[in-house]
Image (cartoon, grey):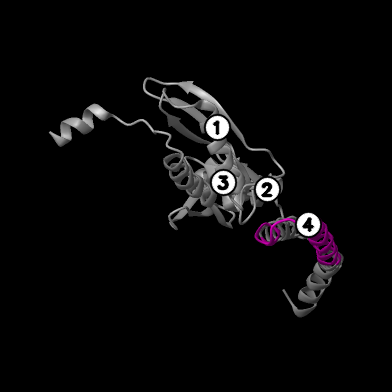
Amino acid sequence: MNTQDWINKGYNIILDFGPKLIGAIIIWLIGGIIIKFLLKGLESAMKKSNYEASLQKFLISLIRWALKVILIVIVLTTVGVATASFAAILASVGLAIGLALQGSLGNFAGGVLIMIFKPFKIGDLIEVQGQIGVVKEIEIFTTKLTGLSNREIILPNGNLSNGTIINFTTEGTRRVDLIFGIGYDEDIKKAKSVFMSVLKSHPKVLDSIEPTVDVIELADSSVNFAVRPWCNAEDYWRVYFDITENTKIALDEAGIEIPYPHAVEIQKKS
């Protein structure tokens, strides 16, 4: 081929490919602007809905890459590149990744559900998967709790979102359930008065919700009382321990016996 033939061939290529290339560039530029506009609107909507910051960043990043992949496919189609094989490769890669990360994807989905529906938030005292602790951090794949003995508990979000969640903080108050027993020979009304006096005198027991003292069981060697004061959620353990100790002191001062196995005690002394 001589020079003129090369020039003619180049000219034909430009005439054939040039408009497609220009169209692809325009689509790329306009598509980029549209993606930025959509992401900005989505980010604003998430902030108004009080989505968790980590969930916002992850979803924005995920959607940005998904939109860019779609835009690339459209651009390649515009310039005449066959995208059927490209789409098949993407589908195969996606399937392989999905199978390999099945557990991780379940945890991710659980994390998204937790962040959207918010069954608990950072600082809440919850019971999940047999563990009790204060929520320290909510991440995409795991949730971290600080246990009652200051242990860090890391739970996968997949199991967390599919199980029972008990949130002790949501309502703001908690009922403290205590059981005390007295001897059958003791005065029930006097004992109830002692229990109620202990509850009323504690500064962290709420006055707005009336505590209750009721006979719950006639056991083998004792009459058992259900003693149930109410307190703020953060005061639960302080009230639990104080009422337990103060009740023992008050019963002793009132001369009311708390039953114990006398036979065993006699055997030990002998």
| Dot in front, 3 or 2 | 2
At numbered mark 3, what does the secondary structure look like: helix, strand or loop? strand
The residue that label 3 is drawn on is: 126
Which residue is pictured at 71% across the width and 59% down the height?
56
Is mark 1 in CB contact (under 8 Å) with mark 3? Answer: no
| Dot in front, 1 or 3 | 1
The residue that label 2 is drawn on is: 172
Q: Distance between the residues labelled 1 and 3?
A: 32 Å
Counting residues from the N terminus, which is met first, the one under dot 3 or under dot 2?
Answer: 3
Q: Please, what is the three-letter code of the amino acid marked with disc 2?
A: Gly
Q: Give the range drawn in magenta.
A: 30-57
Expressed as whole percent of the image width and height from the top left, the position of residue 85 reads: 64, 49
At numbered mark 1, what does the secondary structure look like: helix, strand or loop? helix
Is mark 2 in CB contact (under 8 Å) with mark 1? Answer: no
> Which mark is on residue 47?
none
Pick whichever, 22 or 74, lies toward us: 74
Q: Please, what is the three-letter code of the amino acid marked with disc 4?
A: Met
| Dot in front, 2 or 1 | 1
The residue that label 4 is drawn on is: 46
Q: Please, what is the three-letter code of the amino acid marked with disc 1?
A: Lys
Pick whichever, 45 or 243, lies toward us: 243
Which residue is pictured at 69% across the width and 57% down the height?
52
Expressed as whole percent of the image width and height from the top left, the position of residue 102 reads: 52, 43
Q: In which quarter of the image is the N terminus?
A: bottom right
Q: Distance between the residues labelled 3 and 4?
A: 26 Å
- Per the picture, the main secondary structure of the magenta-coloured stretch is helix
Pick whichever, 262 or 84, lies toward us: 262
